[in-house]
């Protein structure tokens, strides 16, 4: 059989971009065997040609400074977008799709924001648009949701999908590091985004939860539909309290289906030490899925890094090569689509951790107990640490919790320090 060549152009040769040629070379024989094609990078778009010369020479591709050198080149079959950011990447991808190139991207910000637009354009142009690496880098979660779990009804997706914050929280819990020390270490190790705001404020995780929700429930939500709380305000005393109660703090992306719609949040939460997610430490990511048929399943791995993320990018290239061979083009990565409905607060149920500071432990202990009873929030455990009171509750709706928080706003006898969700 005559071997064909799938010619690829890469936009951006940063951490992930420089891993792609390495994986392609390392797995050359396997890729050729399963696709019947050679996949070769022929061009890369870079800002500074001098800096990337050695890499280009090593892997025999040409460096170009202008996107036109790629989209106007009829030889190129696939464009791999790895420049990040939203607007410029959107323009480049649209140009590539309009020129009938298949596109692979690892850009969660872009896909969570303009995924529908780009998917529609790809379908119109009869080309493929894949982005496995956009969520949890090296974990093959999107293809798992869209194919292996296609026959299962998903009820809940919990994700530790930001390596930077997971690394920071692990350092804070296990080594007693301060927030600032943990952030510097995460940046030095290269986990954080160039501007770590999106990491620590939960935005990066929220983009990923938007994409995961689309694959899990067929519903397209926007970033504005996600209730987001980052880890900036997390107090080390809460980290210590959680530890003493057999919980660990994790930044949890939580996407759940209720009777009337879905609810998606990103927030620090207490995860019981027996929960599978509690053992996902440092920069590692995991996605925990509850579904009707399989029950509980968890997908664990590195959420970032050159080779792990590049392996996901190359898996998309392999899928495109197979599409080309079998002449199945223009099928969206995620076909599942349902009308988007968000659950009302009265439907969204959680267990809660409340931390209060009180003036007079004994007196306010009882006062708090009766306020919880009045709000119809059942107390599971109430712990008195002198002037600090921790209350762990049974399940109550988000609506009841908000009402309770309003009802205690004006009291001066105690101060609410924090409230977090609990995952047992
Ligand atoms: N900054 C991201 C993280 C990189 O820390 O997980 C991968 O999206």
Image: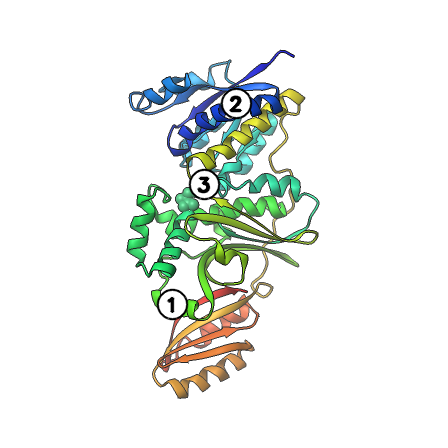
Q: CA distance from mark 1 to mark 2?
A: 49 Å
**Label 2 SS:** helix
Q: Which residue is mark 2?
A: 28
Q: Which mark is residue 109?
A: 3
Task: Relative to 327, say whether 215 is above or below.
Answer: below
Quadrant containing ligand 1? top left
Question: Along the polypeptide, which appears first: circle 2 or circle 3?
Answer: 2
- Regarding residue 222, the answer to whether it shows in the image is no
- Regarding residue 305, the answer to whether it shows in the image is yes
In the shown orientation, is residue 18 left or right of residue 3?
A: left
Q: Which residue is mark 1?
A: 240
Question: Along the polypeptide, which appears first: circle 1 or circle 2?
Answer: 2
Counting from the top left corner in percent of width and height, residue 242 is at 43, 67
Count neighbours of disc 3 (C-alpha within 10 A) and say few if under 14, some if 14 to 19, many if 20 or more: many
Question: Along the polypeptide, which appears first: circle 3 or circle 1?
Answer: 3
- Quadrant (top left, top right, bottom left, bottom right) of the C terminus: bottom right
Q: Are marks 3 and 1 in contact (CB under 8 Å)?
A: no
In the shown orientation, is residue 326 left or right of residue 355?
A: right
- Towards the viewer: 280 or 183: 280
Q: CA distance from mark 2 to mark 3?
A: 31 Å
Q: Are marks 1 and 2 in contact (CB under 8 Å)?
A: no
Direction bottom: furthest residue: 363
Count neighbours of disc 2 (C-alpha within 10 A) and say few if under 14, some if 14 to 19, many if 20 or more: some
- Towards the viewer: 332 or 62: 62
- Towards the viewer: 285 or 224: 285
Task: Relative to 48, say whether 224 is above or below.
Answer: below
Q: CA distance from mark 3 to mark 1?
A: 33 Å
Residue drawn at point x = 54 percent, y = 71 percent:
400
């Amino acid at each position: 059989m005559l071997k064909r060549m799938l010619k690829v152009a890469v936009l951006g040769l940063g951490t992930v971009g420089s891993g792609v040629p390495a994986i392609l070379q390392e797995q050359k024989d396997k890729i050729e065997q399963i696709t019947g094609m050679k996949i070769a990078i022929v061009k890369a778009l870079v800002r500074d040609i001098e800096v990337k010369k050695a890499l280009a020479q090593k892997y025999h591709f040409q460096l170009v400074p202008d996107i036109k050198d790629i989209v106007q080149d009829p030889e190129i079959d696939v464009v791999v977008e790895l420049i990040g950011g939203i607007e410029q990447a959107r323009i480049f991808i649209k140009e590539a799709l309009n020129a009938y190139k298949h596109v692979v991207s690892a850009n969660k910000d872009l896909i969570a924001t303009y995924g529908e637009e780009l998917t529609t354009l790809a379908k119109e142009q009869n080309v493929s648009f894949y982005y496995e690496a956009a969520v949890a880098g090296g974990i093959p979660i999107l293809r798992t949701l869209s194919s292996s779990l296609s026959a299962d009804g998903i009820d809940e997706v919990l994700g530790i999908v930001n390596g930077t914050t997971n690394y920071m929280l692990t350092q804070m819990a296990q080594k007693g590091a301060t927030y600032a020390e943990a952030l510097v270490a995460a940046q030095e190790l290269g986990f954080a985004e160039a501007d770590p705001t999106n990491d620590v404020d939960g935005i990066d995780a929220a983009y990923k939860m938007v994409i995961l929700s689309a694959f899990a429930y067929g519903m397209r939500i926007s970033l504005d539909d996600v209730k987001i709380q980052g880890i900036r305000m997390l107090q080390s005393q809460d980290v210590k309290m959680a530890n003493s109660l057999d919980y660990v703090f994790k930044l949890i992306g939580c996407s759940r289906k209720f009777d009337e719609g879905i609810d998606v949040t990103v927030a620090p939460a207490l995860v019981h030490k027996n929960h599978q997610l509690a053992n996902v430490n440092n920069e590692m990511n995991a996605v925990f899925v509850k579904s009707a048929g399989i029950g509980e399943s968890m997908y664990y791995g590195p959420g970032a890094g050159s080779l792990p993320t590049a392996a996901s990018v190359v898996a998309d290239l392999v899928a495109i090569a197979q599409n080309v061979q079998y002449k199945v083009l223009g099928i969206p990565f995620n076909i599942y689509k349902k009308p988007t409905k968000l659950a009302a607060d009265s439907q969204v149920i959680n267990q809660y951790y409340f931390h209060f500071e009180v003036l007079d432990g004994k007196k306010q202990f009882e006062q708090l107990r009766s306020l919880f009873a009045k709000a119809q929030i059942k107390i599971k455990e109430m712990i008195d640490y002198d002037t600090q009171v921790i209350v762990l509750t049974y399940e109550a709706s988000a609506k009841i919790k908000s009402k309770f928080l309003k009802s205690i706003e004006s009291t001066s006898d105690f101060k609410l320090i924090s409230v977090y969700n609990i995952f047992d």
